[in-house]
Image: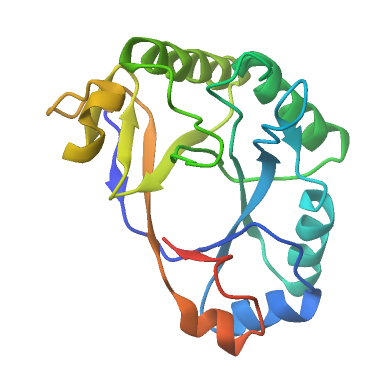
Amino acid sequence: MASSVFSDLAVDLSSLQTVETYKCILRSGYKRVVIRGYIEAYGRNPGGAIDRNFVQNYKNARAAGFTYIDVYMFPCTGRPTCKTPQQQVQELVRLINTNKIIVATAWLDLEVDPNANNWSMGAVKNREVLRQFYRAWQSTGWKWGIYTVREIFYFIHVYFLCSKRLVNTFNCKSRVDTNGVELLEITIGFWILALNCGMPIGIIAQF
């Protein structure tokens, strides 16, 4: 089964937004929102936690008229105190099921956080952790995918396509093998929408 790399217009939200803000986003032509449901929480023991704003953000988006809502998780990695990939995925899935939340697609957010040193485990260990997340999401039976910024890397099951400056982090391959995993690329910097809709700069991304 071949997967596709595609471009779509959506807004990624990582902080609590009002119904009015979501209505503004909808009026601006965006039909899809991707709401953060899970955070690194790398300073906790164990690390990894539900985003406390996720459920309310979802309700506000629905109240504003959005019917195409995705969720993304920014997982805890790189520390011995992090919950396992399986635990983190199960925690988010359980929350969504318990609250009867309907999401079109779940996204695994892969990006380097210099404050957390989240991908400082070396290429071999990094790849193994990514495989564990892959297996955890596959086991849910949900529609899911990977999203990241072009400047960082694409995770494609076992194979990687990434920027030269991070080639040593993941021992990236130069070929693409999506292996059924959907990919979504983020382009950061769509600030006009943030200003028009009254959102703080730095919380949205154009897909």
Depth order, front residue of 55/79: 79
**Any part of residue 1 in sight:** no
* Residue 126 point in image, percent of width and height: 40, 18
Q: Is residue 124 left or right of residue 128?
A: left
Taking the view exactly as shown, the residue that stands out farthest to the left is: 174
Q: Is residue 181 left or right of residue 174?
A: right
- Residue at 43%, 17% (x, y): give it: 121
Depth order, front residue of 189/20: 189
Q: Is residue 170 left or right of residue 57?
A: left
Taking the view exactly as shown, the residue that stands out farthest to the right is: 98
- Residue at 56%, 42% (x, y): give it: 105
User: Is residue 167 positioned above or below 184 on the image?
Assistant: above
Depth order, front residue of 198/42: 42
**Any part of residue 201 in sight:** yes
Q: Is residue 87 left or right of residue 188?
A: right
- Residue at 58%, 14% (x, y): give it: 139
* Residue 168 point in image, percent of width and height: 23, 25
User: Is residue 193 positioned above or below 31 on the image?
Assistant: below
- Residue at 31%, 37% (x, y): give it: 154
* Residue 172 point in image, percent of width and height: 21, 25
How is the protein colored in the picture? Answer: rainbow
